[in-house]
Image (cartoon, helix red, strand yellow):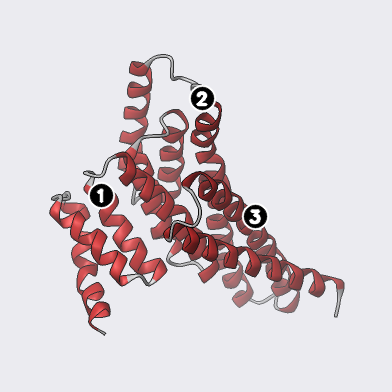
């Protein structure tokens, strides 16, 4: 076996270990075997490390593909892999680094930059949120970056937490299983935090229900969140997402 093959095998082993660790961490947190602070710290570490390893694997396999096949088909494969690498980079830059402001502030007890004037924060975040809403489904990557900017100065912003998580879920659906797992770990955490901050915000319940079903095959958990969502009268555009999936959730529960 060549050195490059051995290196790729080692990376794949690291990836599998980290993804299994993420699954175990989610399970332990769900059953109360680990507290929220340790869970958040470990989740961020595992997501960051797994995303970095997956990115290295994608780079190595893409290089191998070009060596083996320089045809047009290889270019198509490369384009797909570039999309996948973009998703992985989003997890590293936006999910881990973007949420670190809240974590550091919680640990140190210090104010985040801009916290001295509440009015300034509200004006700034309102402007950025407006731009993010307009960009949501036109350019999700830009919208995610805008929501991350909001969270850097206002880490308790429920709308930014909710919609950044939802966009990560949407763009991850065309990716591989390992990237979907990273999306689930990140999105479910942010949506859970949004619900903890404002349990009456329907959008977070709606999107958590869909995320549980689409990325974690958890029909029971999805049904619970979707029921709460419906009871809280979500906006029409959010309800349309729920209506499109509720029959699938009910069918899964009836099996």
Q: CA distance from mark 1 to mark 2?
A: 30 Å
Q: Residue at x 41, y 30 (%)?
A: 154
Instruction: Give the structural element (helix, strand or loop) at label 1.
Output: helix
Residue ID for mark 3: 49
Name the quadrant containing residue 224.
bottom left
Q: Residue furthest bottom?
A: 255
Question: Looking at the picture, how far across and down is residue 77, in whole percent?
Answer: 59, 72
Disc ID at residue 109: 2
Instruction: Give the structural element (helix, strand or loop) at label 2.
Output: loop
Question: Tag 2 or tag 3, which sits nearer the N-term?
Answer: 3
Q: Residue at x 52, y 44 (%)?
A: 94
Up-down relation of residue 197 to residue 71 (above or below): above
Up-down relation of residue 207 to residue 135 (above or below): below
Q: CA distance from mark 3 to mark 1?
A: 30 Å
Left or right of 232 in this view: 20: right
Question: Looking at the picture, how far across and down is residue 105, in whole percent?
Answer: 51, 29
Residue situated in front as seen by the camera: 74 or 41: 41
Q: CA distance from mark 3 to mark 2?
A: 27 Å
Instruction: Give the structural element (helix, strand or loop) at label 3.
Output: helix
Up-down relation of residue 74 to residue 55 (above or below): below
> Which quadrant holds the N terminus?
bottom right
């Amino acid at each position: 076996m060549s050195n490059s093959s051995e290196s790729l095998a080692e990376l794949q082993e690291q990836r599998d270990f980290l993804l299994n660790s993420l699954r175990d961490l989610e399970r332990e947190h769900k059953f109360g075997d680990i507290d929220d602070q340790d869970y958040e710290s470990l989740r961020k570490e595992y997501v960051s490390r797994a995303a970095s390893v997956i990115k290295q694997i994608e780079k190595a396999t893409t290089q191998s593909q070009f060596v083996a096949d320089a045809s047009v088909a290889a270019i198509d494969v490369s384009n797909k892999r570039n999309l996948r690498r973009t998703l992985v980079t989003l997890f590293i830059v936006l999910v881990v680094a973007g949420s670190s402001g809240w974590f550091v502030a919680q640990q140190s007890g210090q104010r985040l930059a801009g916290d001295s004037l509440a009015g300034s924060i509200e004006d700034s975040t309102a402007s950025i949120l407006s731009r993010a809403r307009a960009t949501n489904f036109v350019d999700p990557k830009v919208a995610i970056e805008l929501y991350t900017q909001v969270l850097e100065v206002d880490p308790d912003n429920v709308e930014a937490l909710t919609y950044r998580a939802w966009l990560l879920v949407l763009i991850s659906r065309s990716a591989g299983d390992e990237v979907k797992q990273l999306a689930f770990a990140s999105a479910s955490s942010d949506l859970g935090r949004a619900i903890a901050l404002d349990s009456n915000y329907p959008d977070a319940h709606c999107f958590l229900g869909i995320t549980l079903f689409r990325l974690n095959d958890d029909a029971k958990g999805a049904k619970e969140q979707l029921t709460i969502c419906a009871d809280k009268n979500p906006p029409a555009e959010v309800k349309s997402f729920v209506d499109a999936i509720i029959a699938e959730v009910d069918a899964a529960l009836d099996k």
